Image (spheres, coloured by chain):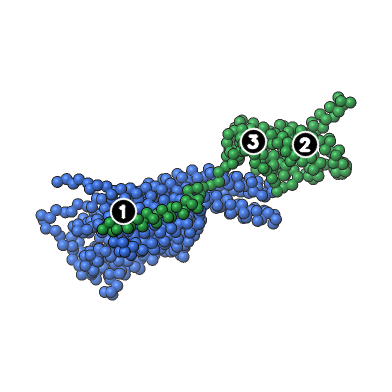
Chain colours: A green, B blue
Amino acid sequence: MSSRLLALPAVALVLVGLVLGVQVAYGGGTFSPLEPADPCAHRSVTSQSEGIDALTEQLVLIGLDEAACTLGTSREALTLSLAQSAEPSDAEVAALQNGLEAAVDRMAADGTLPQASDLVDDVLDQADLNSFIDTVIRALPDSVIDNAIDLQDVLKRAIADLDMRELLANIDDQQALNDQIQAAVTQAVKESLLDRLRSLVAGG
Amino acid sequence: MRRAVAPLIAVTVALVLADSAIVTLALPDILFNLHTTVAQVAWVLISFNLVLGLVAVPTAVGFRRAQPRVLGAVGIALFAAASAWCAVAQSIEVLIAARCLQALGGALALVGCLELLVALYGERRGIATWISAGVIGAATGPVAGGLLTQAFSWQAIFVVQVPFAVLAVPAALAVRAGPPAQPPAEFVRHRPAVRSNLTLALLSAALTAALFLLVLLIVDGWQHSPAAAAITVSVVPLAALLARPLARWLRPPPNVEIGAGCFLVAGGLAGLALLPSAELAWTIAPQALVGLGLGLTVDQLTAQAMHLRLPRVEHASWTISARHLGVVVGLAILTPIFTADLMDAQVPAEQAITALVLDAPLPAQDKVDLARALGGLLTDQQGEIPDLHPAFAAADIAPEFQAAADQLERDLDAQLERAATHAFRDSFLAGAALALLALLVLAAPPWRRNP
C-alpha cells in the first residue's frame, strides 16, 4: 500500500526536480534583457569610422557615459530620454555639455585624441573653400598645423559654444547638424588661433 | 452507420471542448483580419468559455426530461450552425455573438451526448468515453487550431467543424435512448462535489497558462509561425496519453494520482517560467510535465465529481461549468499580469537595443540611420513585440559592414526574445501557484457537512 501511495508522488518529484534543475543549471531564471553597464566605470570606446566621424563618435560615446554618470542614470536611459523628449531638461543639457568636454580631456589624457593634422584633409573635403586656399593649407607640413592648432583647446571651445538644445533638435536633420557643428568648430579654430597669436605677441 | 454513431458522438464532445482553446493560435490573424483590438479579440476566447460555463448546469437542469437524442441533435445542429456563422463573420462583434451561440449549442450537445454515450456503451464506459473525449479535445484544440490557421486561415477552424457536426445530428437521432431515469420523489438530489469541481476549476485556470500563454509566447514573443507553435504544443496532448499507462503501472489511489498531477502541472509551469533561452526545445520537458499532469488529473477529477451522483447529467454539467469558468478565471488572472509585464518589459528592451546599437561595430552614420529607423518602428509598434527587420532591410549598409549589421539584427532579436520570455515569467508562475492551490484544495482536511 505504501509503495502505491508513494511511487507516483516520488516519480513526479524526481521529474519536476530534474526538469527545473537542468533549466536552472543552463541559466533559467536569468534569461532577461541585457543590463545597462555602469556609466561611471571606464569603458573603452572604438569606432569603425575614420577622421572627424570617428572622433565625433568617440566623443559622443564617452560624453554620454560622463553625462549619465553625473545624472545618476544609465547611458542608454539618457540616450532614450534625449531622443524621445522634445525638450531636454536643463540638467541633461548641462551634463551633456560637461560630459563632452570631459570626453575631450579623457581622450587627450589617454593619447587617443588625434592631432589636428590628422583631420585637415577631412575638414577641407567638407569645407567650401577657395581652391587656392585649399591647396595651400593641404601643402602645409603637419608639424606647422599641429603647432598652430591645439585640437584639445579647439574642441573644448567648440563644445562650449554649441547650443546643445539646438544640436539635439537638429539630430534628425543631417545638414543642419553639420552646419551647426562646422560653424562652432570654425569659430573655435579662429578663437584658438587668435589666442595663440596674442600669446606669441605678448611673449615676443 | 450504426458503427459510426458512437465515434461521431464522441468526436462531437471532443469538438465542443476543443473549441475552448482552439482559437488561441488564430487570435493574431483574427486581430489583423477583423481590424479589432487585443482586448476585443480576447473575448473570442472568453465568450465561449464564459457562456459554456454559465449555461451548462441550467441546461442540464432545464432539459432533464427531454429526449437525449433530440436534445443532442438540436445542440449539435445549433453548434454546427454557429460554427458556420463564426466562419463567415465579418466583424468582431458578430464573431463574439456567434461564439456565444456556439457555446449554447455546445452545452446542449454535451448534455445530450453524455446520455447517448451511456445508452450506447453502458454507464461506466459511456461516462469514461465522454470524459476522455473531452480531455483529448481540450488538449488538442490549440494544436488543431494552429495547424488549420497556418494551412488555410482562421475561418478554417470553424469550417472543418461543420461536416463533423452535420454528420453527428443523424447519428444522435439514430440512438434509441429515453430520458434518464428520474429519481423517486423522496430522493434527495446529490449535492455537487464541491472539492472535485473546485480543484478542476483551479487546475483549468492553471492549464490556461500552458495552453494559452505558451502559444502567445511562441507566436508573438518568439515570432514563430502558428504551425510551429501547434507542433510544439502538441507535446501536451502526447504526454497526456502517457498518463494512463503510468497510473496503471503505479496504481496510486485516486487522490494521490490527482495530487501528483497537480504537482506536475505546477512543476511544468514553473519550468516554463524558468526557460534558459528562446529555443523551442526548452519548452518540451516543462510541457511534458504539464501534459502528464493534465492526463492524471482532469479525467480523474471529472469522474470523481460524477461518481455515484444523481442526476448524472447535472453533475457532468457541474464539471463542464467548473472547467470553463476556471479557464475564464485563469484568463482574468493571468492576462493582466502578462500584459502589465509586457509593458514593463518595454523599457529594459529599449535600453538593451540602445546599448547594442551604440556599441555596434558599424560606421557612425549607419548607427545613426539604424537608430532613427528603429526608433520609428518602436514608436509605431507600441504595445506589441516589434518586428525590427524593416529597419535593417531599409538600411544602406556598405558590403564590408553587412555581416556586422546582420549580427546586430540577430542580437537585437535575441534581446526582444529575452524581454518577451521574461515578461511571461510571472504569468507562468501565477499559473503554477493556481495548480498548487488546486493541490491544497485536494489535500485540505474534510469539510464539515451540515447535518
Tell me where residue B269 appears, x and y as whole percent: 40, 52
Residue placed furthest toward the right: A204
Under circle 1, the secondary element is helix
Q: Which chain's residue wears label 3?
A: A
Tell me: A126 left or right of B290.
right
Q: Provide the chain ID for the residue under circle 2.
A: A
- How far apart, in angstroms, are the residues tagged by discs 2 and 3? 20 Å
Report the disc number at residue A151.
Answer: 2
| Residue most extreme to the top | A202
Tags 3 and 1 on a common chain = no
- Image height of B3 relative to B376, above or below: below
Where does residue B144 sit, x and y in percent of width and height? 41, 63
Query: Residue at the location (25% across, 50% down)?
Result: B195
Mark 3 vs mark 1: in front: 1
* Residue at the far front in the pictured view: A2
Which residue type does callout 1 highlight?
Gly
Q: On the image, numbered disc 3 is attached to which residue?
A: A66
Looking at this view, is B98 or B284 the one in front? Answer: B284
Q: Name the residue type under label 2.
A: Leu
Examine the rendering and report whether any part of residue A51 can be seen. yes
Q: B444 or A104, which is in the foreground?
A: B444
Q: Is residue A171 visible?
A: no
Which structural element holds mark 3? helix
Instruction: Give the amino acid type for the residue marked by disc 3 in the picture.
Output: Glu
Q: Residue at 25%, 63% (x, y): give it.
A: B127
Residue A77, how many percent across, how many down? 57, 39
| Horizontal side of residue A120 vs B278, given as left or right | right
In the picture, the quarter occupied by the C terminus of chain A is top right
- Residue A11 falls in image quadrant: bottom left
Numbered badge on residue B259: 1
Q: Alpha-carbon distance for marks 1 and 2?
A: 75 Å
